[in-house]
Amino acid sequence: MTPDGIREELARGLLGIGYAELTPVQRSVVDLMAAETPTGHGPALIDDRTGWERLADDVARVGGSWSFLGAFALAMAAWVGTNLLLARWAFDPYPFIFLNLMLSTLAAVQAPVILMSQNRQAARDRQAAEHDYRVNLRAELEIMRLHDRLQLSEAQLQRIEAALAVLGPSEGPRPDAAAGS
């Protein structure tokens, strides 16, 4: 049978529709089944990020941690405390205009970097979900195919048993009688 015939048979037998009518994901699963090749590894195992993307992910990981919040709170308290205690020689006297500039700059830079990291993670999650769907669909279809084969084997076994029953008891020695001698 040709590879196209195998694909068509699998599609009709397992999904009830022709190969041409399948979605691209279903086609890829049927192709893998017809070729009897493994599904492959998931996208999570491949790190194809650029240096800038890795940096954005690191900034998002650090910026979204409790240790960053604690260190940031300590730095803020030290900045304000130092400028209040040394009011006469303060480098940023009350109302802390330079501190406000630094905080605004930090927020203006950190927010887009975190959003870039989240968008990239969402794309990777979509790829992983699609891969999981392919693996699960293939497993389900393989189980259906095995179930069909098992039913065929059971039907053949029943036909063989029926044919043996028609022939009557066997003429040869019984296995349990030979063991007792």
Image (cartoon, rainbow, N blue to C red):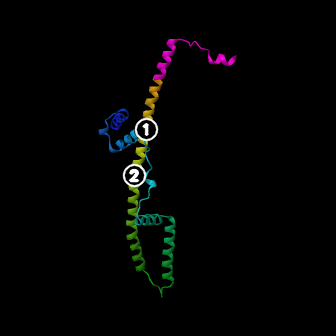
Residue drawn at point x = 39 percent, y = 59 percent: 120
Quadrant location of residue 103?
bottom left
Q: Judge whether 19 appears above or below 102 on screen.
A: above
What is the chief secondary structure element of the magenta stretch?
A: helix
Is residue 158 inside the magenta stretch? yes
Quadrant location of residue 169?
top right
Query: Which range of residues does the magenta coloring cover?
Result: 156-181
Residue drawn at point x = 40 percent, y = 68 percent: 110
Image position of 178 (left or right of 143)? right
Q: Judge whether 157 appears above or below 7 on screen.
A: above
The spot of residue 65 in percent (x, y) is 49, 64
Identify the disc placed on residue 170: none
Q: How crowded is mark 1: few (under 14 residues within 10 Å), some or many (20 or more)?
A: few
Mark toward the start of the polypeptide (1 vs 2): 2
Nearer to us in this view, 137 or 10: 10
The spot of residue 85 in percent (x, y) is 51, 83
The amino acid on which the numbered mark 1 sits, given as a three-letter code, is Glu
The spot of residue 55 in percent (x, y) is 43, 66
Quadrant location of residue 111?
bottom left
Q: Mark 1 points at which residue?
A: 140
The amino acid on which the numbered mark 2 sits, given as a three-letter code, is Gln
Q: Mark 2 points at which residue?
A: 127
The spot of residue 147 in percent (x, y) is 45, 31
